[in-house]
Image (spheres, grey):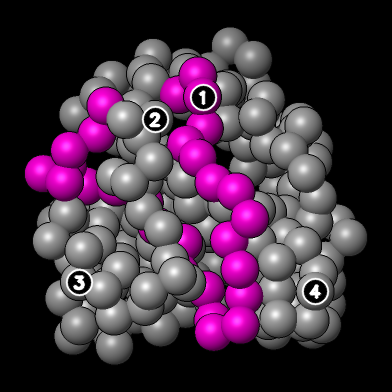
Amino acid sequence: MLQEVKGGVAKAVRAAHPGTCVFSQEVFEEATWGWMGCGVLLRRGAEILDCGVVGGLPKPQRSLWARVRRPDGQEVTAVSWHTPNAAGDGVAVKMAAYSSMSEWLASAPRPLVLGADLNTWRDPIDLIDPDPSDDFFEEHAFIGPTPSHGLVDAYRTVLEAGGELDRRRAEKHEGPLAVSHTLSSGASHRMDRIFSSPDLRPSAGGYEYAGAIEAGSDHALHWIDFS
């Protein structure tokens, strides 16, 4: 699942992987290739059965969903999403996007995997219940302990299963759990995350930061294996 893909890059990837990738610039009729969009790239042998952008979002082209048939025949919903930035788009727009996406994900076909640049700074060892009076309530609810979308943070699940969360908790580690983006101020955050429906089992995962930066991205590559 790819985010912030420029039109020229999307066209190059599409030409190199015919039939196994799709980008929001192709399926959102109001889009132009001059805009950045989201993409889903599949391994050979997989098939895209249906796709589209998520309706109701303030910026639909920042999303893409694809119903995919894997080489083994299993069908999976793959979702790529890039949330609005509060500094550029405003808090209200960002929270509206979180609310709309949460509602859409809750009713989407399972199994489901979401890969997203969430533009969030909150990433504590222990999940925090959202404060309804907070201006960022919808964002905090999305990544909180009981999100309405019903998905789980796959990397957090991997760390918990391996005892890593307990180790960091004992060391009084305050987070983030990993670094996926560093701001110009030097502050580092885990903005990029993979969420999955509970019927999938994350077994391993990580962030490849240095290699992604060398390749020209300002965000880490995040990967998860499912057993």
In the image, the segment drawn in magenta is 30-57
Do the numbered discs 2 and 4 sit on residues whose CB atoms are within 8 Å? Answer: no
- In terms of depth relative to the viewer, which is nearer, 28 or 61? 28
Q: Is residue 154 visible?
A: no
- Label at residue 73: 4
Q: Spatial distance from mark 3 to mark 4, Cα to Cα?
A: 28 Å
Q: Spatial distance from mark 2 to mark 3, Cα to Cα?
A: 22 Å
- Of circles 2 and 3, the one toward us is 3
Q: Spatial distance from mark 1 to mark 4, Cα to Cα?
A: 28 Å
Amino acid on which disc 2 is placed = Pro
- Label at residue 12: 3
The residue located at (21%, 47%) in the rendering is 36
Question: How many residues crowd mark 4 within 10 Å: few (<14), some (14–19), many (20+)?
Answer: few
Dot 4: element? loop
Residue wearing tag 2: 60
- In terms of depth relative to the viewer, which is nearer, 39 or 170? 39
Q: Is residue 140 magenta?
A: no
Residue wearing tag 1: 55
Answer left or right for 125 relative to 72: left
Give the main secondary structure of the magenta stretch.
loop
- Label at residue 118: none
Q: Residue extending furthest right? A: 199
Closer to the chain start, of discs 2 and 1, is 1
Closer to the chain start, of discs 2 and 3, is 3
Question: How many residues crowd mark 3 within 10 Å: few (<14), some (14–19), many (20+)?
Answer: few
Closer to the chain start, of discs 2 and 4, is 2
Q: Position of residue 212 (x, y in %)?
A: 28, 80
